[in-house]
Amino acid sequence: MSTTVRAALFTSVGEPPAIGEVVLPEPGPGQVRVRLAAAGVCHSDLSLSNGTLPQTMPAVLGHEGAGTVEAVGEGVASASPGDRVVLNWAPACRACWFCANGEPYLCERSGEAARTPYAALPDGTPVHAGLGTAAFAEATNVPENALVPLPGDVDPGAAALLGCAVLTGWGAVANSAGVRAGQSAAVIGLGGVGLAALQAARIAGADPVIAVDVSPSKEELARALGATHFVTAGDAAAKEVRALTEGRGVDHAFEVVGSSAAIRSAWSMTRRGGTATVVGVGAKDDRLSFSALELFHFARTLRGCVYGSSDPARDVPALAGLVRDGSLDLASMVTDEIGLDGLPDAFLRMREGRGGRSLVRFGP
């Protein structure tokens, strides 16, 4: 039986969402319906809505969510109604070349669910799911492999952040860069992903941990989550970071903005032989250049990072353990709790670089 739910609908590029209704069909073979408890508002949702990333519309965006399994389709073996789960927007097939070679975050089939309509408007118009998940709705239908079990003692609201912000930010530090105790780190951009990277650097034992952002108002939160220093982003940021590291620069710099200017800043604040990791999603026409001499002379590594090089099936339980023992603070990353009606303002805050994570809460 189909189900009608409230959702945030994006109908054209650059326009804010409108709250309306979508009709979810009964879960098909291998599909699961999840009733959402909460959904985080990620910068990638902004990129999908403004055309930086391709998105067929009309669409329901939102890819960072947690909730409870409500119904399952034929052949589903790993989930049952009542199970608490985190959504995985890049589910691995476990069979392609990348999966077989230990890189499930690069799975060549992970985007299949996003290419097919998952629901419809009341008039029958097909609706697509942003990144295959469509978490900006009261409920959604997803493939069975898009679910990660959520331990029963973790708040499903804050746990929504595990599905993207924390897996990406923490994974960039722990998986992609492999930051070790005693190494220095800088994080550029203190949205949800940047705040997770900041905490991950602190958990890894990095010192100093330098937070960099355009907004000085974020300094207090950055220091509370583990930053030892705060630098205001701008032309002088790299020089200030080098001054905090005896003139060398940091062992690891993490760009969590998604712009060529921020990538260049991360590169410039990295020591010779260090690593700059690009976590932010930038535009395809935002070009970045290097001279052949500087690539040789600095011997730095510039690397990309998709989904924190994570395997959610492995990493979500580990992150839940860090939440449980108090090492990882999810609640402080959320600066605004909203309902669906608050999404337009949440997108505006992202565009203006204000606040940390906005979290949509569903139900009581």
Image (cartoon, helix red, strand yellow):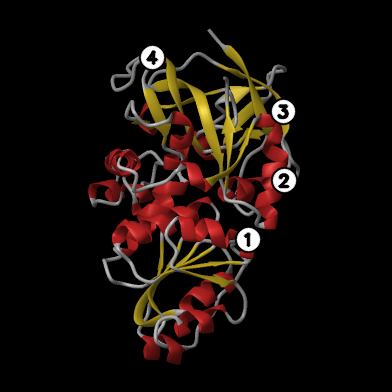
Q: Tell me the SS state at disc 2.
A: loop
Category of crowding for the residue at label 2, using alpha-carbon neighbours closer than 10 angstroms: few (below 14), some (14–19), many (at least 20): some
Reading the image, the residue beneath label 4 is 81
Marked residue nearer the N-terminal end (2 or 4): 2
Mark toward the viewer: 2 or 1: 1
Q: CA distance from mark 1 to mark 4?
A: 43 Å
Category of crowding for the residue at label 1, using alpha-carbon neighbours closer than 10 angstroms: few (below 14), some (14–19), many (at least 20): few
Marked residue nearer the N-terminal end (2 or 1): 2
Q: Tell me the SS state at disc 1.
A: helix
In the rendering, at what x and y percent does residue 196 appear? Answer: 44, 53
Reading the image, the residue beneath label 1 is 217
Mark toward the viewer: 2 or 3: 3
In-image side of 130 versus 89 (left or right): right
Residue 213 can be seen in this image:
yes
Query: Based on the displayed image, in which of its 4 quarters is residue 126 positioned?
Result: top right
Mark toward the viewer: 1 or 4: 1
Residue in the picture at 61% in, 43% down: 55
Q: CA distance from mark 2 to mark 4?
A: 36 Å
Q: Is residue 353 above or below residue 345?
A: below
**Residue 18 bears which disc, if any?**
none
Q: Amino acid at mark 1?
A: Ser
Q: Amino acid at mark 4?
A: Pro
Reading the image, the residue beneath label 3 is 19
In-image side of 109 versus 223 (left or right): left
Q: Quadrant of the C terminus?
A: top right
Q: Tell me the SS state at disc 3.
A: strand
Residue 10 can be seen in this image:
no
Mark toward the viewer: 1 or 3: 1
Q: Amino acid at mark 2?
A: Val
